[in-house]
Image (cartoon, rainbow, N blue to C red):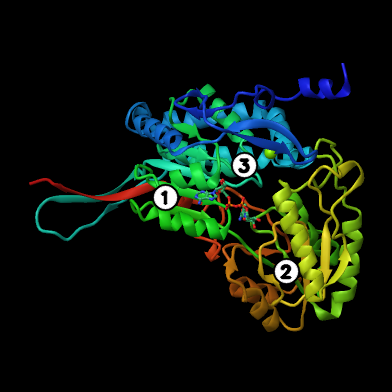
């Protein structure tokens, strides 16, 4: 057996079966339409093919989700939905190695990073299980004549369309799937064309957990086809979207057709502010990995690193030193910290920005090249730092979505805040300082849906995060997330 064959046989079934369709109404719906190639970004090889969903496929999936919503799923008690989530928690736990391998092959996420997200993913499912019996309305006093009892009641919003990107589908899908299961909604998922496999596999696990057919459907395909059809579908009640700000605008426009409720998590250009009194032993790796984690393909990556001028040289030198030690390479190698970008399209985009940075007069400190040698066929870019960046350069204004840091000097806290907030985005932001006064000023002043202090990029499902400005709206995580999957009715009970 050749080495290649030996590896092939170890591939998960979802990768090798070769006839992937949409997952609709509890099973595979193999469409006879066109197929799309999906790549292993670490090797540039076609991994398998996906069904290219049409609006007819979306119609079929939405109709199935509607039937499930009104039929068997509506008869599940909150406790039964909670138990389904508990079973899913255990299934995800039991299949974790397989799911990691799928994600690693399909998305290029290093296995070691996948392993590190296990606890987070299971906690997220457990959190939403706990919310299945929450989502309570209130009994409220009224001052009306007569014998009235008045209250608010919460009810599931209906069929939710989940449109998610390629930068971590196994993580992002659960915000939608688990919330739908907790609240009694149903979901039609449209994963990104570059990264659909873990979402398809999850749909099988949802069935294994005893959830009725149609509660979670998956349609694969292109954004402008299957995605647009879902976003505009008149029988979809809510869209939960994560992706680019541009596509977010399309989703808003499409929602007008039936006044869909929206949750939008969009782009970012988050500020990460390092003061001279910060503990650099923590701030240097923290700020670096705040961008480089997942090869920079993170919506809240802290890509604008503002550094107080007095420590500028030392900080840049130490961050460059840290960056040179990062192990970039084969995602399946357990020592690898950073994998490739998702596609040649993203590679081109990121290399384009490296070029722009140079032409704008920023100083390239480290990285900036596509990787060659054993990695020449994959979509690898070296982790890259630009210093002497000014906040009005394009590399400081536009979302690059790759491992590229812009270091921007500042003098006072006031300057830092002004520059940090001078962006159309408002997703994340951080401050590194040991001075509680500085921390308080920055925490209040940074205009973003998340602010981290002496850390970067951590999230907890029971607290969650959201966007401000053009980074979107609709909270993810915590009780407010559950609220988004429910609508409220006022009930007036006349006892006379
Ligand atoms: P995108 O926003 O177009 O894709 C995200 C999802 O939306 C995918 O599932 C896609 O199929 C779907 N989609 C695309 N057009 C649609 C439409 N008209 N209607 C409904 N669904 C649609 O992002 P893309 O093109 O993959 O990446 C481009 C840039 O977007 C990246 O370089 C990055 O800057 C940004 N991005 C940001 C993300 C974030 O988490 N904030 C995630 C992915 C991309
Ligand atoms: Mg892929």
**Residue in view at x 50 percent, y 55 percent:** 264
Q: Mark 3 points at which residue?
A: 169
Crowding around mark 1 (Cα neighbors within 10 Å: few <14, some 14 to 19, many 20+) is many
Q: Which of pointers 1 and 2 indicates the residue nearer the eye?
A: 2
Q: Which of 449 and 255 is in front in this view?
A: 255
Percent from the top left, x then y, of residue 340?
78, 46
Image height of 392 relative to 293, above or below: below
Crowding around mark 2 (Cα neighbors within 10 Å: few <14, some 14 to 19, many 20+) is many
**Residue in view at x 67 percent, y 36 percent:** 38
Disc 3/disc 2 C-alpha distance (Å)? 26 Å
Image height of 317 relative to 342, above or below: below
**Residue in view at x 84 percent, y 24 percent:** 4
Disc 1/disc 2 C-alpha distance (Å)? 37 Å
Q: Mark 1 points at which residue?
A: 483
Contact between marks 1 and 2 (CB within 8 A): the answer is no
Q: Can residue 326 be seen in this view?
A: yes
* Helix, strand or loop under label 3: helix
Percent from the top left, x then y, of residue 139?
28, 50
Contact between marks 3 and 2 (CB within 8 A): the answer is no
The mark that comes first in sequence, 1 or 2, is 2
Q: Mark 2 points at which residue?
A: 395
Q: Which of 387 and 494 is in front in this view?
A: 387
* Helix, strand or loop under label 1: helix
């Amino acid at each position: 057996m050749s080495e290649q064959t030996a590896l092939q046989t170890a591939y998960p079934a979802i990768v090798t079966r070769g006839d992937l369709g949409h997952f609709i109404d509890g099973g595979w719906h193999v469409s006879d339409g066109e197929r799309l190639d999906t790549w292993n970004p670490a090797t540039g090889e076609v991994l398998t093919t996906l069904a290219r969903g049409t609006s007819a496929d979306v119609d079929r999936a939405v109709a199935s989700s509607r039937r499930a919503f009104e039929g068997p799923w509506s008869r599940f008690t909150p406790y039964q939905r909670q138990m389904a989530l508990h079973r899913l928690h255990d299934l995800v736990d039991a299949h974790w190695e397989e799911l990691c391998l799928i994600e690693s092959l399909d998305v290029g996420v290093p296995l070691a990073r996948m392993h590190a997200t296990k606890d987070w993913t299971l906690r997220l499912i457990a959190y939403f299980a706990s919310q299945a019996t929450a989502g309570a309305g209130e009994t409220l006093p009224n001052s009306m004549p007569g014998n009235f009892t008045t209250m608010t009641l919460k009810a599931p919003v209906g069929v939710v369309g989940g449109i998610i990107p390629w930068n971590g589908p196994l993580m992002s899908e659960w915000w939608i799937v688990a919330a739908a299961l907790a609240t009694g909604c149903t979901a039609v998922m449209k994963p990104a064309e570059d990264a659909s496999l873990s979402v398809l596999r999850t749909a099988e696990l949802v069935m294994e957990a005893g959830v009725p057919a149609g509660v979670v459907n998956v349609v694969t395909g292109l954004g402008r086809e299957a995605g647009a059809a879902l976003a505009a579908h008149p029988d979809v009640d809510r869209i939960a979207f994560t992706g680019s700000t541009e596509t977010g605008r399309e989703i808003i426009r499409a929602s007008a057709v039936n006044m869909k409720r929206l949750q939008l998590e969009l782009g970012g250009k988050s500020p990460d502010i390092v003061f001279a009194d910060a503990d650099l032993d923590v701030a240097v790796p923290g700020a670096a990995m705040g961008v480089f984690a997942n090869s920079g393909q993170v919506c809240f990556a802290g890509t604008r690193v503002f550094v107080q001028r007095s420590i500028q040289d030392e900080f840049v030198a130490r961050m460059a030193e840290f960056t040179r030690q990062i192990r970039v390479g084969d995602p399946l190698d357990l020592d690898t910290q950073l994998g490739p970008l998702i596609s040649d399209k993203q590679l081109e985009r990121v290399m384009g920005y490296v070029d722009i940075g140079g032409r704008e007069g920023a100083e390239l400190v480290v990285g900036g090249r596509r990787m060659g040698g054993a990695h020449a066929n994959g979509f690898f870019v070296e982790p890259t730092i630009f210093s002497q960046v000014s906040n009005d350069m394009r590399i400081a204004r536009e979302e690059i979505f790759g491992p590229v840091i812009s270091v921007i000097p500042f003098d006072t806290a006031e300057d830092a805040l002004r520059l940090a907030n001078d962006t159309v985005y408002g997703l994340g932001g951080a401050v590194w300082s040991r001075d509680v006064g500085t921390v308080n000023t920055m925490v209040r002043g940074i205009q973003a849906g998340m602010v981290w202090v002496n850390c970067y990029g951590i999230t907890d499902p029971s607290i969650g995060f959201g966007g401000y400005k053009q980074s979107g709206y609709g909270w993810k995580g915590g009780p407010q997330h559950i609220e988004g999957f429910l609508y409220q009715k006022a009930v007036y009970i006349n006892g006379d």
